Image (tube, rainbow, N blue to C red):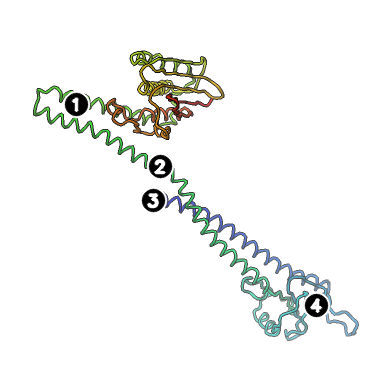
Amino acid sequence: MKKLKKQIFLLVFLILTVVTTSVFAVYNVQLYSQSKRSVERSLNQTMKIGLGDFDIFVKPPESENAPSKYDNFGNVRFMDTTVFTIILDEDNMPETVINHSDLSLDECDTAALCEKIVANGKTEKIGLLYTSRYSYKFENQSYITVVDNEATNKFLSETLIITFFLYLALELIFAFIAKRITNRISRPVAESFEKQKQFIADASHELKTPLAVIMASSEALESNPTERKWLDNIKSESDRMNKLIADLLDLAKSDAVDDKAQFAVSSLSKAVEKSVLTFEGVMFENGIMLEDSIEEGIELNMDEFKIQQLMSILLDNAVKHSAKGGTINVVLKREKDIILTVTNEGEGIPEGEEQKIFERFYRADESRNRNENRYGLGLAIAKNICLSHGGEISAHSSNGKTTFKVVFKG
């Protein structure tokens, strides 16, 4: 069970982690791509507007009032990005620096920057925006447009750090959520596992007693072959074991709630009426009155044998727990759903145990049930039959009456 819970926890945690990692990765990748496109746009826009239709290889006019071929660069402006153009002389040294933003330029050694860019030999470099301080475009050996990446570096790095710590916090939350989900998912499995263990223990206990009696009687029979009582004991306990095994087989069969091979639409009214008629003699012998109200024409998609078995269990239970001179009332009617009730007068269900009576091997009166060869499996079988037919069964006791109610969805 621990291994199963561990596997469920790891699976749930892994799914949540993969989803979160994907979301944060996509977010940071998109943010980086947007920043990179912004840098590229700044470089290209500066070149496009600044260069205009001028031929950069044409010397500027000698007249003092004549426009310079670089005048257009001064018209390129950026509000939130530091962009500047370095005009080079014939020796590829800075001649003029044109600031394209409203932000003041940080002091930098433009000569060293130019030398580094020229030596690099690349006409364009964006670099890794998390660490690269500058991006540039080097055109025609005449000017270099530079974008200061400091603000972008800071923004991307801070965002990456924030998302990382948020990711760690979410991982802790996901571990808690995965544990809760694991407990919820594994609870029915754990309950089923515990019930199975209890079932095996109870069945073993029930089989152990008659086996012990049979073995002891067999040994006594060897010593006293003429003693008839040892054979009677063996037969009696064999009958008990046979009934228990038959009940266990019925319970195992009724657990197969998805087996619809024997289902067919037939008259539920007739099936209930037939079962009631079968028990009339038993009730008469026990001094119990019978009242029934069975609505005709009610049909159900059902396994008729199982329905009759359900009725036998309920009627037998009612007879066993009815006081002499009491009345058993059977009602079948159709309202919104199909409702079947079996009510008896006499011994009621202990308060708070209305649901427990449907558990396997549950017996309110241990000694009485053992004497009557009853093992607490009948109502468990009845419950499974109801479930296999899409129905529900419940029990209620009050004012000296006990009612079992079965509801089939109409």
Q: Secondary structure at mark 2?
A: helix
State whether residue 154 is above or below residue 253: below
Q: Nearer the viewer, mark 3 or mark 2?
A: 2
State whether residue 131 is above or below residue 315: below
Q: How many neighbours does mark 3 have within 10 angstroms: few (below 14), some (14-19), or many (20 or more)?
A: few
Between disc 2 and disc 1, whose residue precedes?
2
Q: Nearer the viewer, mark 3 or mark 4?
A: 3
Alpha-carbon distance for marks 1 and 4? 118 Å
Amino acid tagged 1: Ile
Q: Which residue is mark 1?
A: 234
Amino acid tagged 3: Lys
Between disc 2 and disc 4, whose residue precedes?
4
| Quadrant of residue 99 within the rendered picture | bottom right
Between disc 3 and disc 1, whose residue precedes?
3
Direction front: furthest residue: 399
Alpha-carbon distance for marks 3 and 1? 44 Å
Q: Secondary structure at mark 3?
A: helix
Q: Residue at x 17, y 32 (%)?
A: 215
Amino acid tagged 2: Glu
Q: How many neighbours does mark 4 have within 10 angstroms: few (below 14), some (14-19), or many (20 or more)?
A: some
Q: Secondary structure at mark 1?
A: helix
Q: Residue at x 52, y 57 (%)?
A: 173
Alpha-carbon distance for marks 3 and 2? 13 Å
